[in-house]
Image (cartoon, rainbow, N blue to C red):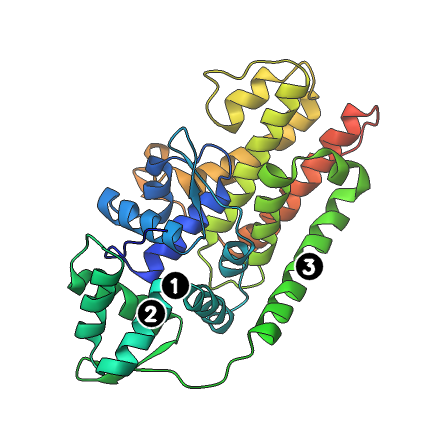
Amino acid sequence: MSYNIVFSTAEDIVGVVDAILAKPKNCSKDYICEFADISVMQAENALLMAQELNLISLNSNGTYKSDSFLARLIVSSRNDDHKAAIMRLVLEQYEPYAMFKKRHGFTGSMDLASKQIKTLYSMSSSYKDIRNTIINIGTYSRALINDGANTYSFNQDEISYIEILELALKFKANDDNALSTQLGELACSYIDTKNVFEPLSEAYSKIQNMNNDKNTIILYSGNAFESFLQQIADENGISLEGKSGISAKSDALKSVISKKHRGMIQYIIQIRNAADHGADSNEGGRVWDISDDSAQFYPMIVSSIIRDIVFYKNGNIIV
């Protein structure tokens, strides 16, 4: 297997993974740049490193996906300690990093260890980019300790990955159960797991840690709902080609979604637009702030409307 470590930061890597999990279907590079608020070059390097770490993969049509459960745990972490521990587990499983540690043990030099793994794995990047990326991800994950004066040492603290994973899995299961309860058995059995349930579940996880960007919570939920509308359209043989966004898709589905429910969808649209569309020309170019309450309740409202539409599809009129 070939490897190449390009220059990137842990923050950018987590950002692109977050974007891909927020939009699990047809996630393009342009979307990732916009979601993560990074340049094309930053995105390209972060995407390459996320692939190196087996957090994401590239589809044949040039879009990206993630089937990594560790990726889900990273973006849904309750706090920075858990996020760092899971990223450290990802890093420790990466073969070039394990070799870097071994070579550093022989040489005592970050530079020389970087040069040696560049040679061993025939990497095209400069040894400085290799070194700087390893140091950045290493310090982010607390696998490396910054000793000052541009010197670093490997963290020798014992870390129980089993305990960390058990705790993370417990939290994730709690979030999945909360969403399942909100949706109900009928809606849970109907909605697409990958494109609707999982991103909505990530939104539920993110509201447990309000240090997360509130806009991200809105975007995860909104994207899940847009995928739900696509699922409704596919089931009924309704083409949504050229229908961009929730509003256009909802209007195109008026034959199968009630007027009352389409009215409720307006709430989803307006909050998502406030989070996603930047400056509002109707408000003199000002940008809407998302309140803590809006971010916290939005995923629950989205899941409730999904539940009600599924009930309607099965002959029950409920709001």
Asked whether, in this view, residue 214 is left or right of residue 228, the answer is left
Q: Nearer the viewer, residue 161 or 101?
A: 101
Seen in the picture, residue 11 relative to 316 is either above or below; the reply is below
Q: Earlier in the sequence, mark 3 or mark 2?
A: 2
Q: Residues within 10 Å of mark 2 (few under 14, many from 20)?
A: some
Q: Label 2 near label 1: C-beta < 8 Å?
A: yes
Q: Label 2 near label 3: C-beta < 8 Å?
A: no
Q: Residue at x 30, y 38 (%)?
A: 285
* Residue 277 appears anywhere in the view: yes
Q: Earlier in the sequence, mark 3 or mark 1?
A: 1
Instruction: Residue under label 2, please give it.
Output: 99
Q: Residue at x 57, y 51 (%)?
A: 202
Secondary structure at badge 1 equals helix
Q: Nearer the viewer, residue 69 or 258?
A: 69
Structural distance between the alpha carbons of marks 3 and 1: 30 Å
Q: Nearer the viewer, residue 5 or 149?
A: 5
Seen in the picture, residue 242 relative to 81 is either above or below; the reply is above
Q: Nearer the viewer, residue 5 or 182?
A: 5
Instruction: Residue under label 1, please give it.
Output: 95
Asked whether, in this view, residue 227 is left or right of residue 150, the answer is right
Structural distance between the alpha carbons of marks 3 and 2: 35 Å
Q: Residue at x 57, y 32 (%)?
A: 227
x and y, in percent, of residue 236 in the image: 68, 16
Asked where in the image residue 58 lies, by quadrant, the reply is: top left
x and y, in percent, of residue 226 in the image: 55, 31
Instruction: Residue under label 3, please give it.
Output: 173
Q: Residues within 10 Å of mark 3 (few under 14, many from 20)?
A: some
Q: Residue at x 69, y 60 (%)?
A: 174
> Label 2 sits on what residue type?
Met
Q: Residues within 10 Å of mark 1 (few under 14, many from 20)?
A: few
> Label 1 sits on what residue type?
Glu
